Image: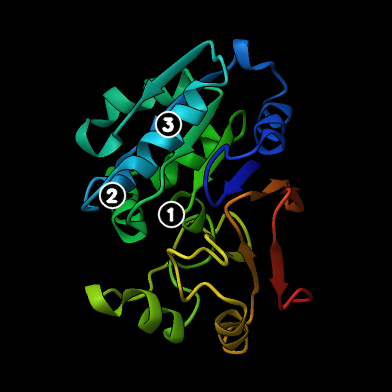
Amino acid sequence: MKLLLTSNGLSTESIAEKLFALVEKPSHETTIAFVPTAMNPTEGNKTWFVNDISRIHGQGLKQLDVVDFSALEKEEWLPRFQAADVLFFSGGDTHHLIDHMREAGLDTELPRLLETRVYAGISAGSIVTGPTTAVSSDDIELYYEDKGYKGKPALNFVPFHFRPHYNSPDFPNARKGVMEDIAGSIKETLYAVDDTSALAVVDGAVEIVGEGKVDVFNPNA
């Protein structure tokens, strides 16, 4: 399985280059199915979403499809995913995304799809690949209490937790001290990844990509 887990999408040239290295095709021969589902319930300014999809579009792709599987029947979304080289999952609401993956049956289809395709995620789209949607009760309190969320089992494609937007001024709890506290209450490795970095995962082997800051907590878990 090949995954590119990003905090902020194709925010640097090196992250974009790594995507097409995983695909093993140049950008102009690559088809991407972009999945906006996680964005649907989020409120307010969507400049971040426009920027994310614009950076993907700017790669000069063979085709960029937009597939909101939560608005379609399986017989509609599955062929469109099968036609893509990359399934690129937007940021937004992590719990909304994993809930709809399960409701649609996408969680059970993805392992087969990813035998020959690359999974790429932005923020929430990356978080759902881990063991759970929230790394501890502390994390639930800090990040999700205002919405009444509780941690849920996620896809478990990777054996670690992915924390996006590390050190971002827009996410004041995504700081080293908070991550250290969380790491002390979990058994898995936790990667805290900033907006100019990503993780490339190939058959379980993790490579840090980008020019920014990534801190690894519980590295020997």
45 or 197: nearer the viewer = 45
**In this rendering, position of residue 149 left or right of residue 51:** left
Residue 43 rendering spot, x and y as whole percentages: 21, 53
Residue 211 rendering spot, x and y as whole percentages: 73, 49
Q: Give the residue pinned by disc 1.
A: 124
Question: Which image quadrant: the N terminus?
Answer: top right
The chosen color scheme is rainbow
How far apart marks 2 and 3 lie (CA) works out to 21 Å
Question: Which image quadrant: the C terminus?
Answer: bottom right
Q: Amino acid at mark 1?
A: Ala
Q: Quadrant of residue 157?
A: bottom right
Q: Residues within 10 Å of mark 1 (few under 14, many from 20)?
A: many
How far apart marks 1 and 2 lie (CA) works out to 13 Å
Residue 167 rendering spot, x and y as whole percentages: 57, 67
x 63%, y 84%: residue: 180
Q: Quadrant of residue 80?
A: top left
Q: Amino acid at mark 2?
A: His
Q: Which mark is residue 53?
A: 3
Among numbered discs 2 and 3, the one appearing first in the sequence: 3
How far apart marks 1 and 3 lie (CA) works out to 15 Å
Among numbered discs 1 and 2, the one appearing first in the sequence: 2
x 74%, y 28%: residue: 21
Q: Give the residue pinned by disc 2.
A: 100
Among numbered discs 1 and 3, the one appearing first in the sequence: 3
Q: Quadrant of residue 193?
A: bottom right
x 53%, y 10%: residue: 62
What element does badge 1 sit on? Answer: helix
Q: How many marks?
A: 3
156 or 123: nearer the viewer = 123
Q: Residues within 10 Å of mark 2 (few under 14, many from 20)?
A: some
**In this rendering, position of residue 194 left or right of residue 45:** right
